[in-house]
Amino acid sequence: MTNNTSNRASPTFLTGRPICVDLDGTLVKTDLLIEGFLTILSSRQALTCLPKLLASSRADFKRRVSELADLKTELLPYNAELIAFLRQQRQAGRPIVLVTAADRKIAEVVAKHLDLFDEIISSDGVRNLKGEAKSRELVHRFGRKGFDYVGNDRADLAVWREADGIVIVNASRVVSSEARKFGNVLAEFANQPRLLSMALRAMRPHQWVKNLLVFVPLLASRSFGDTSGLLGALCMFASFCATASGIYLVNDLMDLAADRRHAQKRYRPFASGALPLSFGAGLAGALIATGMALALVVGAAHVLTAYAAASLAYSLALKRYPLLDVFILAALYTLRIVAGGVAGQHPVTLWLLAFSGFTFLSLALVKRTGEMVHVKHSGFDRTLTRRGYFPEDRPILLMFGTASAFAASVVLALFVNSSAAFEQYRTPEILWGLVPLVLFWQCRLWLSTERGVMHEDPIVYAFHDWVSWLVAVSVLVIMLLASLGPAFW
């Protein structure tokens, strides 16, 4: 925060002239209309409400959203520095007025929560109080130069033009420069984080390691010398990275209230208000479109479409249903392998599908159980938010997960003794070494989960785990020896 201390000390701050405060992007670090609309989209009433919403006027749209959306105002990312500043001014005798283009219902709930405002001026279902309309209303109420105004974006320039004092909050450089032309800037709160760094953080690039699964078909068929197949797999990797990041953004946009209740997730860019919701929605669309275009190039658009549809369905609704959520997560992992096989022109065998299916079901259960362990230790919430699980479900999930891990090892053992293994490897007997290695690795993941150290996706965890790397190298050595046969070693 930077302040013009000479102006703050001036007599104008000690008079009864009101301070008029904008809501969206100023008092709160988010857009409540977009939040409300996203809340409706993620609810069961979306299909019945959308037609009426989209056919209404701007002001009526805001009114309907305020009535339908159950916004948790106590969880909103408020601008703490600005609120402290406003309380100081109120104690000095200044009336504080909430002036917002948001609907009256939302404005009243926010005002009640903060207990800060002497008056509310807002949109009312007929009039959309934004920009010039807000400027005219304030001039009508208080006269030209009869009020100070606190705002943040280009629409507020029309109001600042008529205000006596200007307070700028988290505005862009262009808007801030335009506002200063009107003079008498009383204070400026400039703690806006860098947009690109926040966007990259929201895209979760550390999760891209999961997309390395597209190379599994090349590994299983020992075809890394196939340049065409490798290029196809690389293109598919980029496709999944873009698509998955876009879906992560959608997931965060739909999960704002739940994330704000979470001990760590409340600091995510959207939940904390560090990244504008409108920017996130546009970026999500661009990333998903890019991913689809890349998948089309390598002929795997149908697999990516299935992945995107399942991911979005999971994000919007299916994550709330116990067990169904982990089966979908397992399918999403498996679809990466299938897509890699299509793009690299090395189709996935039924053996690989069976092994990966059980393995990924176990890993999905690891992920969910790890979240439950973390919730228990943090004491932040009794239930796993929006997941439908309870603490007493953990033992049965542990049983399901370990059973899936052993089932995957059984499938691997059966493959080693199958005709397919004898056709593909010169010395398939050596592949028996894979069975205890894979089982050891999965059992170790479960032990880490129960000890409370599984704080992230298990594949991401494994990528940073030296034991997992040692197991992976051992697996590659065993497969190489089995392929080369005794003539080599």
Image (cartoon, rainbow, N blue to C red):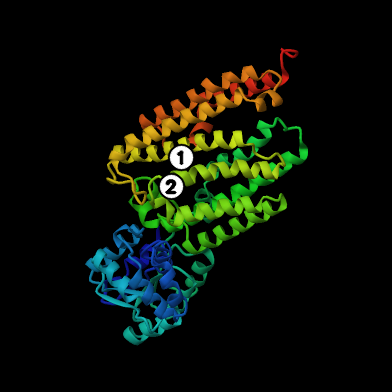
Asked whether the beta carbons under mark 2 and mark 1 sit within 8 Å of each other, the answer is yes
The residue most toward the front is: 419
Q: Which label is found at residue 325?
A: 2
On screen, 61 above or below 243? below
Q: Which residue is drawn at 37% across and 75% down?
A: 64
Q: Where is residue 73 in the image (x, y as percent from the top left)?
A: 31, 62
Residue situated furthest bottom in the rendering: 140
Q: Which x, y percent locates residue 156?
A: 45, 74
Residue type for callout 2: Asp
Residue 209 placement: quadrant? top right
Q: Quick one: SS at disc 2?
A: helix
**From the viewer's perspective, is residue 145 above or below residue 334?**
below
Q: Which of marks 2 and 1 is nearer the N terminus?
A: 2
Disc 2 from disc 1: Cα separation: 9 Å
Say which mark, if any, is on residue 364: 1
Q: Which mark is residue 448?
A: none
